[in-house]
Image (cartoon, rainbow, N blue to C red):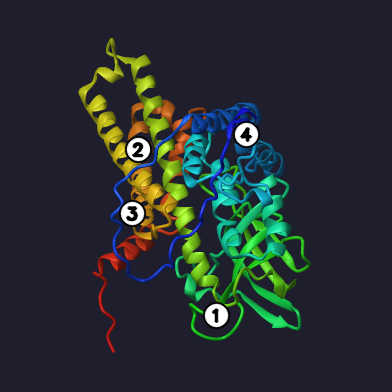
Amino acid sequence: MAFLNQIKSPLMHKVFGHALTTRSVLLTTHRSITFTAQHEELRKTVRKVIETHVNPYVDQWEEEEIFPSHQVFKKFGEAGLLGITRPPEYNGLGLDYSYSIAFFEELANINCGGIPTGITVQTDMAVPALTAFGSDYLKKEFLAPTVAGDYVACVGVSEPSGGSDVAALLTTARRQGDDLIINGSKMWISNGIQADWMSLLANTREGAPHRNKSLICLPLKTPGVKTEKINKMGLKCSDTAIVYFDDVRVPVKNIVGEEGQGFTYQMIQFQDERLCAATAAVAQMDRIVNETIEYCRQRKTFGSPLIDNQVIHFTLAELKTEIELLRSTVYRAADAFISGENVTYLASIAKLKAGRLSREVSDKCLQYYGGMGYTKEMLISRAFRDSRALSIAGGTDEIMLGIICKFLDILPKKRG
């Protein structure tokens, strides 16, 4: 790919900044990232993969309610796009996070939300902690083939009993000699049906809920693992599963980093996930508004284009304003992330606003398509269904508000 040939001095991306704390000084960074000709080469590479290997088949995969993740991810892996910030020794490009931002934005050119969801689980939800804290053995066994597109990865945090209260998860991984015996279940697992391995958060010992959990690299072809597909309202082609564990045996050496630090690792890992989700959402909303503007230019009622209606063009201008303001927050957070700062506060704000604004954009824009917007033939109807998940997955709106309140020190004080 042309982009790969133009990279001269790759910068190693530092995945995490200082340790996550309950309270922190609010970010003072006011810079924004800058895109270069190299970023544009990466964008061209992403668009080419999408136009050739993804969009021609999206409608079929939406009908089938699954896309061939191994086939698709391999194409992205061959283009060097699944490990943009990962170390070169594990098949990555070793670039800074600004290139990931460009990548996430280009994923908006995919004609559905399900495939970008699966891709970003692969690139920025399952492997950040493994990259930062995993042993060389685990990186060779799991990170390198995931970045190459040979493995499909998923994340196992949420459970049938609840997803938001991570400290209260019930899945256990008890030590037996040199092995861990895993029992329990995980739910809402994107890529779960086809995944080769899971970044699993489980209780590995007794003790305080924030100090008794570990992240474990779990091969999903291990005996005792069973998956069951979940049928969803949107994100239809993204396979989503319940995964059951019945005396599943994996080596203790599959624990990422230090045993008992899994909760902390996952909380830090959420920074990647939420910033990634907000970035992709901004680009998706931008595309929706742009396509709605074009539709309203072409569609006429009472002899005039819809776009001439003041309510319509004012509304679209208002939506564009909101999108641009959110983009500024995302870029500010990304710049801070590159600098090694703790971006939990800004990432939570961006994720919260992205979920809410996505619903508003898809709803208001669908209205201007009239009856056509309510049909499966129009991409706006798919966007309407897909966008609703953003306020739930990766931390609900309410969880984001709670995090923001912690940083503002305005949560009620515990009594007794």
Give the spatial CA distance, label 1 vs label 2. Answer: 42 Å
- In-image side of 272 versus 147 (left or right): left
Q: Quadrant of residue 271?
A: bottom left
Callout 2 crowding tier (Cα within 10 Å): few <14, some 14–19, many ≥20: many
Q: Answer yes or no: do the residues labelled 3 and 4 have beta carbons within 8 Å?
A: no
Q: In this view, does 406 lie above or below 319?
A: below
Image depth: mark 1 or mark 2 in front: 1
Q: In this view, does 289 lie to the left or right of 80?
A: left
Disc nearer the start of the sequence (1/2): 1
The mark nearer the N terminus, 2 or 3, is: 3
Residue 385 image point, x, y percent = 46, 42
The residue at the point 29 percent across, 64 percent down is 25
Which kind of residue does numbered mark 3 sit on?
Ile
Q: Residue 49 carries which label?
A: none
Callout 3: few (<14), some (14-19), or many (20+) C-alpha neighbours within 10 Å?
Answer: many
The CA distance from mark 4 to mark 1 is 42 Å
Rounded to the nearest angstrom, the CA distance separating label 3 from label 1 is 29 Å
The residue identified by callout 1 is 212
State which quadrant residue 260 falls in.
Answer: bottom right
In the foreground, 362 or 121: 121
User: Where is mark 3, residue-wise?
Assistant: 349
- The residue at the point 48 percent across, 77 percent down is 210
Mark with earlier residue (3, 1): 1
Near-viewer residue (415 or 271): 271
For the C terminus, the quadrant is: bottom left
Are the residues tagged 2 and 3 within 8 Å (C-beta)? no
Camera sees residue 21: yes
The residue where tag 2 is placed is: 361
Mark 4 surroundings within 10 Å by alpha-carbon count, few (fewer than 14), some (14 through 19), many (20 or more): some
At 68% across and 51% down in the image, what residue appears? 89
Which residue matches tag 4? 4
**Whole-percent x, y for residue 268 in the image:** 47, 63
